[in-house]
Image (tube, rainbow, N blue to C red):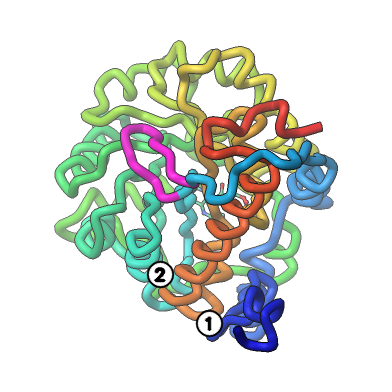
Amino acid sequence: MSNNRIDDRYATSEKYATLRGIHNDAQRHLSEVDWNYLWCGTGDEVTLRDNTAAFDRRRFATSLFSGISNPDTRTSVLGFDLSFPAFVAPFGGGEAVFHPEGHLAIARAAEAVGIQQMVPVAAAHSLEEIAAVSSVASTFQMTFVGDEGAVVEMMERAKAAGYKYICVSYSPIRQWRERMMEDRFTVRGETGPSNFGPGKSDPAGLTELLDFTQPRWNWQQAASAIAKAPLPCIVKGIGSVRDAKAALDAGAAALYVSNYGARTIDRVPAALDVLPAVRDAVGADVPIIFDSGIRRGSDIATAIALGANAVALGRLIALGLAADGEYGVRRTLELLKREFWTTLGHLGCSSVKELTRDSIL
Ligand SMILES: Cc1cc2nc3c(=O)[nH]c(=O)nc-3n(C[C@H](O)[C@H](O)[C@H](O)COP(=O)(O)O)c2cc1C
């Protein structure tokens, strides 16, 4: 036995020992403007702070002598087998500033670790390019805005490329992001959305996507598009029981509780604080994805215990990407999975299913 037995448990030959190392490297690599783009909230950024404070407030109920030494982190959500309950959140609008490989690198890393990827319409690579590099680009996020025919056409295009779900996001409206206003931020041409243009969907679609003056859709319009959708729809941005019920009435196959990482409107509740009420209102059988505020593996356990079937990872993946491309994302996912595993063990859960409200004090 080596004489540094205790250190053996912490020593690693990996470049990053913790998520903090990834965070620090990402910050070193990005310009201040891009760092602000990644981290900005809106208004006074109250909700941005609340999203993580809501996790910091929760306390776990541990279990002594539970007999659990190797918990199973695997789960099945929306028909996907996940190595731990996580998806990559759809983030775009210039993600290639974090790394030129953008969602291509993310796809490879997600596949290597065994989770699924949500791909945004605003990605720097086209939905077909991203679908081609892995088997895990399963959900295509798009905005319900503009002409219904064009929206349905885009969904058909996603289906043809192999996507299995559409993640529906809100109709865009101007966001009051003061860090970006002070930076006079613009999406650079070379990293801008690439799903539009000659031979792709109508170039006017890009104008619509970026045009915040477009009329916002109502629930009837959303229900009509969901009814015509060639794929089941996950409705993202659920922040209340009222919207959860409206989304199900409109035909949603799954709910995605999220405040977009506090990037749309300030002074709304932390996403974690609305999750239990949404779960109670819709019952046990409706799949719920959760994001906004996940910063470590134990946060995943908290979100599952409070009602989510799986979480989605946004800024953490962007940090991994900015730190070291595909490797940075893969290491991020491995560290999250490992800490989630550790948390399950301490809570006396042999599987993801055993995480319940009783796991939180
Ligand atoms: C840089 C950036 C770009 C984003 N772009 C999109 C997008 O194009 N579509 C979308 O639905 N959500 C987008 N989001 C929101 C994420 O999908 C996710 O909801 C959010 O990152 C969760 O918050 P968290 O990262 O603080 O946990 C973006 C988030 C970030 C950080």
Picture quarter with the N terminus = bottom right
Amino acid carrying label 1: it is Glu
Q: From the top left corner, tell me how far across and down residue 160 is, in percent.
A: 15, 44
**Closer to the camera in the image, 162 or 328:** 328
Return the mark for residue 102: 2
In the displayed structure, would residue 212 be above or below residue 7?
above
Quadrant of the rendered image containing residue 192:
bottom left
Q: Label 1's element?
A: loop
Q: Position of residue 197 (x, y in %)?
A: 24, 59
Depth-wise, is mark 2 or mark 1 nearer the camera?
1
What is the x, y in percent for residue 71?
A: 53, 46
Q: Which label was assigned to residue 14?
A: 1
Nearest the viewer among 244 and 352 is 352
Point out the stretch of residues depicted in magenta. Answer: 73-83
In the image: residue 196, left or right of residue 115: left
- Asked which secondary structure carries label 2, the reply is helix
How far apart are the alpha carbons under marks 2 and 1?
Answer: 22 Å
- Residue 255, x across and y down, in percent: 49, 27
Number of other residues with Cα within 10 Å of mark 1, as a class: few under 14, some 14 to 19, many 20 or more? few
